[in-house]
Image (cartoon, grey):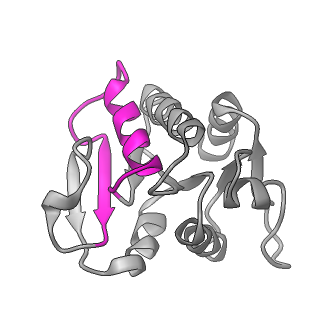
Amino acid sequence: MRRKVVAVVGNSAASEAAYALALELGRALVDAGYRVVTGGMTGVMEAASRGAHDSAAYSEGSVLGIIPSADAERANPYVDIVIPSGLGYARNTLVVNTADAVVAVAGGAGTLNELAMAWQLDKPIVALEIDGWSQRLAGTRIDGREREEIFAAADVGAVMRHLARVLG
């Protein structure tokens, strides 16, 4: 059976609080049997990747990073499988499309782009209530589509309960 993949999206220049939350999230995702995909760079992406490595359930291949450059060496050191896209910000589409669900931690314009793409692709979206686009969009719908709203999560426990419900 294929392991489900969860994208963690957020700032490359994360606040201390966002970094800590993403670290906890990465660990919890792998603990629950998911793989993690990120944009493979710094900040929230690095924290989620690092947290995944800290999981007792970690195994090689648990962390994918789809980086914007063509140089695989640019990925953070916690990425197991680096996909050097050479696509710049267009790689956001690949990150989201690779995932079965998307979790946002804070975030700027790149995160907003990923959330909009996840919405259009009808992916389950969870937004942690921490300053940034995740907090702004938590509990809302991006447009009038008939679909579940972006799930607002106060903490990692709420994220994990929601993912268990929507991903099985």
Span shown in magenta? 40-68
Q: Quadrant of residue 144?
A: bottom right
Residue 1 in view, yes or no: no
Task: Determine the residue positioned at 67% across, 50% down.
Answer: 126
Horizontal and vertical percent for residue 55? 37, 24
**Quadrant where the N terminus is found in the figure:** top left
The residue positioned 37% from the left and 45% from the top of the image is 46
Check the picture and name the quadrant holding the C terminus.
top right
Q: Is residue 64 visible?
A: yes
Q: Is residue 88 above or below residue 63?
A: below
> Where does the image place residue 132, in percent across and percent down from the top left?
68, 57
Q: Is residue 5 left or right of residue 54?
A: right
Q: Is residue 100 above or below residue 118?
A: above
Residue 61 among magenta residues: yes
Q: Position of residue 48 (x, y in %)?
A: 43, 41
Question: For this view, does 43 lie left or right of residue 110?
Answer: left
Tell me: residue 113, above or below residue 166.
below
Q: Quadrant of residue 83?
A: bottom left
